[in-house]
Image (cartoon, rainbow, N blue to C red):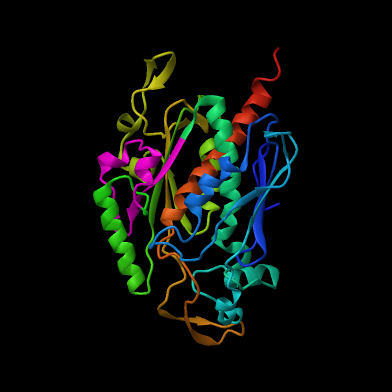
Amino acid sequence: MPNSFGKLFTVTTWGESHGAAVGVVIDGCPARLPLGEADIQGDLDRRKPGQSDIVSPRKEKDKVEILSGLFEGKTTGAPIMMLVMNSDARPGAYDEFREKFRPSHADFTYLAKYGFRDHRGGGRSSARETIGRVASGAVARKILSLAGAVEIRAFVTRVHDIALPAAAADAFPTQAEVDATPVRCPDPATAAAMIRRIEEARSQGDSVGGVIQCRVRGVPAGLGEPVFDRLEADLAKAMLSLPATKGFEIGSGFAGTLLKGSEHNDAYVPKTGRIGTATNRSGGIQGGISDGEEIFFNVAFKPTATIMKPQMTVDVSGKPVELVGKGRHDPCVLPRAVPIVEAMAALVLVDHWMRNAAQNQVFKF
């Protein structure tokens, strides 16, 4: 069903923005994994609203509760259910949107599909649904760290027209460097300019978008499938399933179209204990399968659709009306999207790791 993701490590998120709670059920998590709520809470804290002046002021503790699948501090192999209560919901702020469609939101398309919709903050289409993704991603990240010392690091490389210098974007920053500023850009000077741009947009009742880069190292060669479930295809689906995403590119991406094959090819070379490539324009994936090099990709996020400027739209009868945004919204979604991008990358990698093990490592002929 469309609320589930993954084949062997399967996550199903549930809940709405202004309902009682949101959460996730994980099925397929290996048994005996040491796990507790503390392993989850740190990533949720990086995602939650109200953590700085440049994100939504909604006040939520986003405290996770693990309701099943654990015994004596370890996973049992049974489904893991995690829950986060909604404590600061204000559905009344959305009363006007019961009859009016917000521009660039899912209001109209939800009604077109189901004939019925939850207008309170977008209901199921709200980014609050991503709490379940981040919680399950934290479990996946722990599995990866124990399986192969995999590191996943996402960070903001562009806000509106302010971009991280190319040299800095090619580095693998520490999480401390990423989280040193509320915008989650690891270069302090660029981060300061990004923050000013977001504050400027907010003061004008407007919003801005940008780009997040994700880098992954420690992934062995051999993960992924050569046809429909190519590793980059599943990463693309994972990222484009996130609210507000509008683009995905891996490795050289669109810039690679400006090169000739002789300029773009990644030559194989001997490396310590393995075969590697001299360059990495493919972004760590060849033929849909990881090659052991660092995986890196970019995700584009549009400006937040809800703005405080008057906009023209139509109501449910098709009559033109004016609408002014209400409620509490991020003037730029990128700072809080960083841990979400990391979570989705972890979910894809764990699922492919398990699939590869099931097909190629369990049976010995």
- Most extreme residue toward the front is 72
Give the quarter of the image for residue 87: bottom right
145 relative position to 67: left or right: left
From what the image shows, is residue 251 above or below residue 360? Answer: below
Q: Which residues are magenta?
A: 152-181
From what the image shows, is residue 70 above or below residue 220? Answer: below
Between residue 49 and residue 186, name the one nearer to us.
49
Identity of the residue drawn at 50% across and 66% down: 58
Residue 94 placed where, x, y %? 57, 77
Between residue 22 and residue 231, name the one nearer to us.
22
Is residue 230 visible from the viewing direction of this image? Answer: no
Is residue 306 visible from the viewing direction of this image? Answer: yes
* Quadrant the C terminus occupies: top right
9 relative position to 49: left or right: right
Give the quarter of the image for residue 307: bottom left
Identity of the residue drawn at 64% across and 25% down: 357
Give the quarter of the image for residue 73: top right
- Most extreme residue toward the right is 78
Residue 26 placed where, x, y %? 68, 43
Within the magenta stretch, is there residue 179? yes
From what the image shows, is residue 340 above or below residue 58? Answer: above
Total marks placed: 0
From what the image shows, is residue 276 above or below residue 169? Answer: above
Identity of the residue drawn at 38% across and 16% down: 271
Residue 77 placed where, x, y %? 73, 34
Identity of the residue drawn at 30% across and 68% down: 200
178 relative position to 127: left or right: left
Within the magenta stretch, is there residue 174? yes
